[in-house]
Image (cartoon, grey):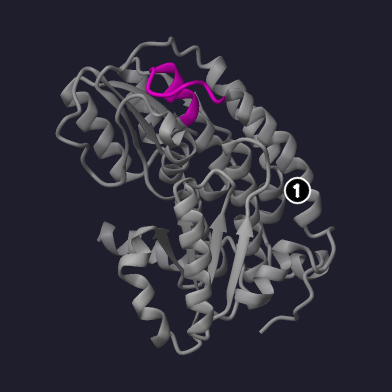
Amino acid sequence: MASSVLDKTAIRAVDSTSQFSETLDLSTHLLDALWRIESAGIAPAEAQGGYVVAGMGGSGVGGRLALGAIGDRLRRPMVVAQGYHLPAWVGDDVLVLVSSYSGGTEEALSCYDDAKRRGARRVVATTGGELAERARADRVPVVPLPGGFQPRAAVGYATVVALELAALCGVAPSLRAEVEAAAVLVERLAGEWGPAGSEDNEAKALARRFHATIPVVVGAEMTAAVAYRWKSQLNENAKLPAFASEIPEAGHNEVCGWPAADGRLGAVLLSEPGLHERNRRRMELTGRLIADAGAPVASVEAKGGSVVERMFSLILLGDLVSLYCAVLRGVDPVEIAMIDRLKSELAD
């Protein structure tokens, strides 16, 4: 087990590809994403049938987060497709965003072909690869993403592209001003929570508390989407089993299992001021019940004035917590041997 110190020296010892730097650049990513989708010249066009974001992993989570940020401002159906097929109702009155950072994700390519067969309007977000080739051959608009990242580090791009396209196709209002405000906020928070910040900053403290547990990240409404992001980042960056849970549903089943956690699990509850008052109350009571069962519990409150600001504050915090957990566990956050093995065996 590595030292509990989380300074730049400790980070350099495990972070072989500067994942901390990519994460701390979230503010730049948000603004660059706005510029890239504007530069793509995608014309506004109403999608009367709705909007689908198709993608996997770090690309697909952008759709989940966008949907969480839009919340009850949604005007028409919007779903996230994380698999090989689109919903049966997709047709020529639906916009499909196919998001794949590498351009080679087999599920995303399958969804692209499915959307083409159904005559759906398509937009692609990618760095290149087979997806870009198919899109350009079909004269489908491509939002070019910058290369050189791990796909999970491009969450700002994936989320902003999904948000902007939701506005362009009329399923949601434009949240551009909220994205711009979020960029200002997360730049400040990156300094506060980053490696140069104090040794007892919120991100480092959470990592020290939960790196030796199996974390269950609990959210509600918008923060449920962020809880899934935390879970995924803890899986990939820290190589930890971790799970996401959603209130109010968790209060109807999952809460019964906590007395059997036997000290192995810990809970992080993600809250924000915009939650329904009953969900806020459920969050508080759930945390108390879990603590009474003997598990470590932490409550995290989002920062910022708008929903998008609060969402990205929680995303940045979770990403940094996962990276600090990697340092404490002595593992390189970039390494994904299990994913590589799965892909290799699928290819055989």
The residue sitting at 37% across, 11% down in the picture is 45
The residue sitting at 39% across, 17% down in the picture is 170
Element type at marker 1?
helix
Left or right of 314? Residue 341 is left
| Placement of 103 over or under 43, stated as above or below | below
Query: For residue 299, which quarter of the picture?
Result: bottom right
Q: Is residue 162 magenta?
A: no
| Mark 1 neighbour class, 10 Å CA radius: few under 14, some 14 to 19, many 20 or more | some
The residue sitting at 69% across, 35% down in the picture is 183
Q: Magenta stretch?
A: 163-175
Q: Is residue 166 magenta?
A: yes
Left or right of 164? Residue 313 is right
Residue 7 percent across, percent down from the top left: 81, 67
Q: Is residue 201 visible?
A: yes
Residue 302 percent across, percent down from the top left: 63, 50
Name the amino acid, label 1.
Answer: Leu
Left or right of 169? Residue 291 is right
